[in-house]
Amino acid sequence: MASDRLFGRPKMPQRPVKERIRDFFEVPLGLPEDVAVEEARRCLQCKKPSCVKGCPVEIDIPGFIGLLGEGRFDEAIAKIKEKNSLPAICGRVCPQEDQCEKECVLGKRGQPIAIGYLERFLADYEREKGITTPPLPRPIPKKVAVIGSGPAGLTCAGELAKMGYQVTIFEALHAPGGVLVYGIPEFRLPKAIVRQEVEYVKSLGVEIQVNMVVGKTFTLEDLRDAGYEAFFIGTGAGLPYFLNIPGENLNGIYSANEFLTRSNLMKAYLFPRYDTPIKVGRRVAVIGGGNVAMDAARTALRLGAEEVCLVYRRTKKEMPARIEEIERAEEEGVNCVILTTPVRFVGNENGWVTGMECIQMELGEPDESGRRRPVPIPGSEFIIPADTVVVAIGQGPNPLLLETIKGLALNKRGYIVADPETGATNLRGVFAGGDIVTGAATVISAMGAGKRAARAIDRFFQDPDSFPQWR
Amino acid sequence: MARILKKEVLTPQIKLMVVEAPWVAKRAKPGQFVILRINEEGERIPLTIADYDPALGTVTIIFQEVGKTTMMLGELEEGDDILDFVGPLGREIEERYFGHVVCVGGGVGIAPTYPKAKTLKACGNKVTSIIGARTASLLFWEEKMRSVSDVLYVTTDDGTYGEKGFVTHVLERVLKSEKVDLVVAVGPVMMMKMVSLLTKEYGVPTLVSLNPIMVDGTGMCGCCRVTVDGKCRFTCVDGPVFDGWKVDFDELLARQRTYLEEERRALDLWLTEKAKEEVSHGF
Ligand SMILES: Cc1cc2nc3c(=O)[nH]c(=O)nc-3n(C[C@H](O)[C@H](O)[C@H](O)COP(=O)(O)OP(=O)(O)OC[C@H]3O[C@@H](n4cnc5c(N)ncnc54)[C@H](O)[C@@H]3O)c2cc1C
Ligand SMILES: Cc1cc2nc3c(=O)[nH]c(=O)nc-3n(C[C@H](O)[C@H](O)[C@H](O)COP(=O)(O)OP(=O)(O)OC[C@H]3O[C@@H](n4cnc5c(N)ncnc54)[C@H](O)[C@@H]3O)c2cc1C
Ligand code: SF4
Ligand code: SF4
Ligand code: FES
């Protein structure tokens, strides 16, 4: 096999570090047309494509890549959209190296096809042309309520609308999109793209009501009284965890959710043109090693921090963040302090954080997740000075809605128990999917769950008895 | 969108608005609050539901102009819309019979005291209310408070109306001379702290309504966290009403000051721009 067939994978063009860390514009620029076509031609068009198994929504990958290689872009994007209604988003934020690309046969001896880059290329091509709405089917006079407008809710709503159902999304915040708008920063996922995808879902006939905190503004029962017959809960994992160590409520210590919400949703990076302030000191410490931590660290740099360190209790190998994102963060100057965990925060007399006492760790036996468990080394305490700290150690299920739904089965960590194939919960007519079922996961898995639930809800309307009450 | 149906200027800095928000009005309970945002660039700010009418679908808010957002809100008129208006948020106070309840409202805190006093009165409690302000011109809703109280005391710090001194002076007198089963206090953090210190001395359980800085108001960001009984609690979902004896008020005071510098900058900029605009309009 020719070596460029094996190793010809293109590099993603991106903006130079010096330029990009001063603003919030997108970092990767997308492949030029000729490069995309050439990369598409590198694909072996496998008869039994292993890449498809790695994609949670089973996109016909050789199918769309083949069309792309022939320059038939419109058909190629249509092929993707058979399975994935948000390609501009997935092409950017899917952890491809752990999913489709990990399974690509070319990866065994050479470099896998850049499936994500190609997906993004086509989605951007379509966006520039203007997205067309598919012809809508005859309306079915059945009302479905979707709670939460993250990728799970948007996908479920879009799929149901395409079948003809009357769908309303209820969203607690003032803007739809879930983590896509309040969590993932502009420089990784431009909000204009999210807005366009939301507009697309609306164009399918979905009504979106913002500022509706279900469980507070009204309950599921109220919605039932208002004529809704099926429900999809896609409320995400939005409850920030803290370390619960001394000094955590000092000024200058943020949860990643607060830090990112201020910056993304409320546009604090445009303060004072936008009213919501954010405080970033000279030295910022971010605690955690996932995508959320990377996003917080890179946001802090762009907000003017001189030094940003990322404190993680295991090694770089165990970091759950995407490799590309770790690389970009380090390129931009984020300093990873590994095998370290904070034990307490120290502050000054005005109640502001000045640093944190940390302890060094070593890796011991593997834990339930298969990763080696970090164990503290006694006597290794040291201080990391910091005037801003962002805690990015994970999120849990927000109980606000769940505690108002009588009898809904939750697991011991507080997530909804739902059938992975259908999203059905123990309450008839109530379905759930996304992070509120699986715990913090990925955009594409949330979308997959939304899609499966949509199919199940359709089946539920045709044959309610096929969904017995199970407890 | 929520339309402003009625606007009243209660004192030079305190304004009342009746807002059309049927969903909020339908489920509102005393103790709960809303979060609003005026325009696309705006901040989300929490305000207590001072009164509500489920039949008319209206919610009353009362706010003190302390910074840019509240001043901009104060400039809106009847017929104008508030872009985002979400609620009711937080937990309601327990509606039951305690016996003799003393409600203490300081400054703009008189507004959120009213629905609590009204409800507690309706539950058969004897309600003694103490309201206070810095000076006579800052006092409002005296008659409304009287209508839901068995006894009402009024104080001003400078003695321009009612009794001279702080609400805590009157509270101490009541605690000394009468049996009190519960104290409910809403006002500046310092006032709630002083009230709680005092009631602890007299062994009278006390509820306070906290006002930390908030963003989402749904338990998603953790910005509103406070320490109560040594534990981290989120005011927007676990509160805003907490046991006053157990609140770390000093921490709350410090946290409220987080954005002092930025708030001043935003306000100055806005005032300067407004002045420029007025000049260019020939004022
Ligand atoms: C900072 C950050 C970076 C990430 N980066 C990546 C990445 O690069 N790649 C990737 O694949 N994944 C990433 N993820 C994970 C991914 O974003 C989530 O797995 C995904 O968004 C989950 O989707 P969801 O629809 O289940 O929930 P969410 O996106 O969380 O949406 C839930 C929505 O429900 C609303 N809601 C909650 N409660 C109520 C209620 N009571 N009433 C009404 N509405 C309610 C919320 O306001 C929210 O809008 C990241 C997550 C974060 C936080
Ligand atoms: C649950 C709750 C209920 C509230 N109810 C009322 C009410 O009924 N009426 C009313 O007038 N105010 C109420 N507040 C306070 C109100 O939210 C703030 O006054 C408002 O956010 C200030 O915004 P601003 O932009 O005008 O001022 P900013 O410029 O943001 O701040 C000006 C000053 O107010 C302080 N401040 C800022 N945010 C808050 C806050 N959330 N709470 C207290 N002080 C703050 C600042 O430290 C600063 O000193 C409540 C707060 C909470 C949390
Ligand atoms: S949706 Fe994600 S996993 Fe599937 S093909 Fe696209 S990039 Fe790969
Ligand atoms: S496995 Fe790789 S080479 Fe084969 S079809 Fe999929 S992308 Fe192409
Ligand atoms: S305001 Fe965000 S958690 Fe309370």
Image (cartoon, coloured by chain):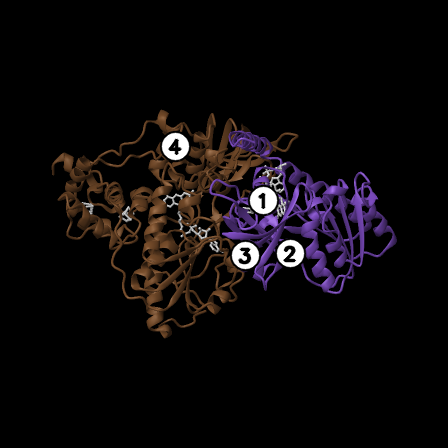
Chain colours: A brown, B purple
| Marks 2 and 4, how far apart at CA | 50 Å
Q: Which residue is mark 3?
A: B21
| Marks 1 and 4, how far apart at CA | 29 Å
Chain letter for mark 2: B
Q: In terms of sequence position, does the residue under pointer 2 or pointer 3 come before the other?
A: 3
Residue type highlighted by circle 2: Asp
Q: Which residue is mark 4?
A: A329
Q: Which residue is mark 1?
A: B224
Question: Picture coordinates of residue B9 (x, y %)?
Answer: 66, 46
Q: Is residue B240 above or below residue B250?
A: below
Question: Picture coordinates of residue A282 (x, y %)?
Answer: 51, 26
| Residue A452 lies in quadrant | bottom left
Residue type highlighted by circle 1: Cys
Is disc 1's CB within 8 Å of ligand 5? yes
Closer-to-camera residue (A384/B247) = B247
Residue type highlighted by circle 4: Ala
**Mark 3 or 4, closer to the camera:** 3
Chain letter for mark 1: B
Q: Mark number for residue B51?
A: 2
Secondary structure under badge 3?
A: loop
Near mark 3 (Cα within 10 A), the count class, few <14, some 14-19 or many ≥20, is many
**Mark 1 or 3, closer to the camera:** 3
